[in-house]
């Protein structure tokens, strides 16, 4: 496969974006992470921050550098040397029991499977963290089994509890704080996913893997009392 | 110079009063919004007149009816929307600096021009920054909005300042202009020519569906754009939904989004739109070329 370099577009005097017309994949994430690092090293004082998207790097500039220089730099780094993605895997406890899984029975029914099979499908895969967005500490994950893809609700729920594990479209995710949302809630984790008092306020990084493992309600409440962040596999 | 701690108390407030500075830049990678004052022109102005750092935190006020009790002497300054202001029940001139004495009551009355009022205070508010910013955002700092009974710290030298001669008028002409300068967003080029034409010729109405996250416009732009893979969005990003809704993202906007981004507004345009009342009109003017060599 011929890998095309990214297109760079300057949007405003403080924003530009790199976009790859590729499939969302681990390979693309590797390239995005390598390119991000290169840019941050080269333009340390000019860049406020770089935000990863599924196919993009959004760059917020404190001061745009000379555009010819920037384009030259990007051309030279079309195929950056990449490092392997982490094998680091965070084990996230999830209670899939009724009390925390209001949409699980309906979702399983619509998929013609038992709730147990749905839980098994959801908790057997590894999911790759691509970036944080939507809410502070919300992880955008790839790796949901295609069988579990489900259209978002047409009318979003007004309040989804912090820690809720849900499925929307081709994605699964965890609500780090109470929030309105249109995804199907299938469980809840007692872990903490965001702490504004810590730097960094999240425990995982883009590129890391996560896995969900089912726990009982008793374990949920026991863990909840002391639980801070998940353990590594 | 004596700088002792003092407090002000919120005796009454409508929704939409919060502390804001120039924002929390650089934490989007953790999903944290930039936040900060919707109108940085007014924010910088009040800090300038008070001889504060231009990035000092100010009160952002969206509704009339705010009533504040000041414990000890200081100076305050108001800019942004023009409103009636009462000091111990008497209407005062709102341009320049306002001297505050022990136990003074300040009340914000009817808003006459614009939509957001900014109140700055000498030496700034005594708030511990979180991630380099004093901007309120629920879950990061404060409760989002201030409510009745809240107290905020500031600094006093215990002496009522002598009436100052600073009496320069805050220019509001830019606020009243209907023309909003916009850059083309990343998905602009996917629009059909007729759709582009409609965006630049439509006189849009600012809707009442608005908060610190986003302002919706009433008029629809039917379009053929597809949803896209989630990518970065910023304050000033204008999203176009498949249903044709134009959503102008404001300072508390999420850091990523999946709707096509058709326009990107610079800071002055964000301030301009934030100062529009629901029902007021705007027209977008596309800024095609700009000088890349100049710092923003």
Image: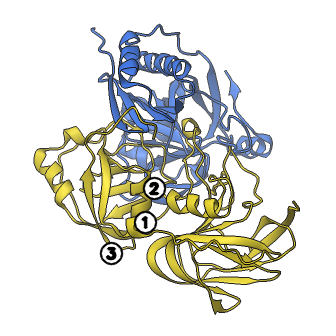
Chain colours: A blue, B yellow
Furthest-bottom residue in this view = B89
Q: Classify mark 1: residues with Cα within 10 Å, few (<14), some (14-19) or many (20+).
A: some
Residue B156 picture quarter: bottom right
Residue A205 against residue B140 in the figure, above or below? above
Q: Position of residue B144 (x, y in %)?
A: 62, 61
User: Could you tell me if the residues under marks 1 and 2 are in contact, i.e. CB atoms within 8 Å?
Assistant: yes
Q: Residue at x 34, y 36 (%)?
A: B291
Q: Position of residue B257 (x, y in %)?
A: 41, 44
**Image-based side of A190 in relation to B262, left or right:** right
Q: Earlier in the sequence, mark 1 or mark 2?
A: 1
Chain of residue at mark 2 = B
Q: CA distance from mark 1 to mark 3?
A: 12 Å
Residue under numbered circle 1: B210
The numbered disc on residue A110 is none
Q: Classify mark 2: residues with Cα within 10 Å, few (<14), some (14-19) or many (20+).
A: many
Q: Nearer the viewer, residue A71 or A118?
A: A71
Q: Earlier in the sequence, mark 1 or mark 3?
A: 1
Quadrant where the N terminus of chain A sits is top left
Residue under numbered circle 2: B250
**Image-based side of B56 in relation to A43, left or right:** right
Q: Nearer the viewer, residue A124 or A55?
A: A55
């Amino acid at each position: 496969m011929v890998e095309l370099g990214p297109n760079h577009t300057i949007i405003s005097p403080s924003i530009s974006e790199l976009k790859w017309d590729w499939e969302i994949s681990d390979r693309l994430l590797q390239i995005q992470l390598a390119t991000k690092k290169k840019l941050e090293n080269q333009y340390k004082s000019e860049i406020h921050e770089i935000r990863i998207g599924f196919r993009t790097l959004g760059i917020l500039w404190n001061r745009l550098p000379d555009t010819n220089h920037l384009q030259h730099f990007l051309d030279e780094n079309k195929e950056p040397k990449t490092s392997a993605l982490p094998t680091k895997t965070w084990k996230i406890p999830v209670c899939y029991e009724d009390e925390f899984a209001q949409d699980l029975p309906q979702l399983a029914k619509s998929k013609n499977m038992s709730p147990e099979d749905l839980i098994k499908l959801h908790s057997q895969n590894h999911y790759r963290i691509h970036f944080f967005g939507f809410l502070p500490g919300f992880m955008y994950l790839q790796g949901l089994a295609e069988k579990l893809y489900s259209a978002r609700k047409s009318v979003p729920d007004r309040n989804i509890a912090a820690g809720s594990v849900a499925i929307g479209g081709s994605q699964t995710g965890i609500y780090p704080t109470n929030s309105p949302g249109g995804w199907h809630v299938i469980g809840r984790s007692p872990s903490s996913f965001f702490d504004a008092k810590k730097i960094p306020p999240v425990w995982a990084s883009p590129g890391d893997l996560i896995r969900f493992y089912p726990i009982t309600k008793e374990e949920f409440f026991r863990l909840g009392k002391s639980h801070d962040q998940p353990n590594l596999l | 110079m004596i700088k002792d701690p003092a407090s002000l108390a919120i005796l009454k407030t409508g929704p939409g009063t919060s502390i804001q500075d120039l924002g929390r830049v650089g934490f989007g990678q953790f999903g944290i919004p930039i936040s900060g004052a919707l109108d940085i022109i007014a924010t910088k102005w009040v800090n300038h007149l008070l001889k504060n750092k231009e990035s000092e935190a100010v009160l952002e006020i969206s509704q009339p009816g705010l009533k504040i009790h000041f414990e000890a002497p200081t100076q305050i300054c108001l800019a942004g929307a023009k409103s009636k202001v009462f000091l111990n029940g008497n209407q005062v001139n709102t341009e320049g600096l306002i001297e505050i004495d022990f136990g003074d009551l300040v009340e914000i009355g009817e808003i006459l021009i614009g939509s957001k009022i900014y109140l700055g205070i000498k030496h700034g508010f005594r708030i511990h920054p979180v991630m380099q910013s004093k901007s309120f955002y629920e879950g990061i700092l404060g409760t989002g909005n201030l409510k009745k009974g809240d107290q905020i710290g500031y600094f006093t030298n215990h002496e009522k300042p002598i009436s100052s001669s600073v009496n320069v008028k805050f220019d509001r002409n830019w606020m009243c202009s209907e023309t909003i300068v916009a850059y083309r967003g990343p998905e602009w080029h996917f629009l059909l020519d007729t759709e582009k034409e409609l965006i630049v010729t439509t006189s849009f109405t600012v809707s009442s569906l608005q908060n610190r996250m986003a302002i919706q416009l009433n008029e629809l732009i039917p379009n053929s754009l597809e949803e896209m893979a989630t990518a970065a969005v910023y304050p000033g990003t204008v999203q176009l939904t498949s249903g044709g809704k134009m959503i102008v993202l404001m300072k508390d906007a999420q850091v990523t989004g999946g709707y096509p981004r058709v326009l990107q507004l610079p800071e002055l345009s964000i301030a301009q739109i934030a100062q529009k009342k629901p029902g007021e009109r705007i027209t977008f003017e596309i800024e095609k070329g700009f000088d890349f060599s100049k710092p923003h």
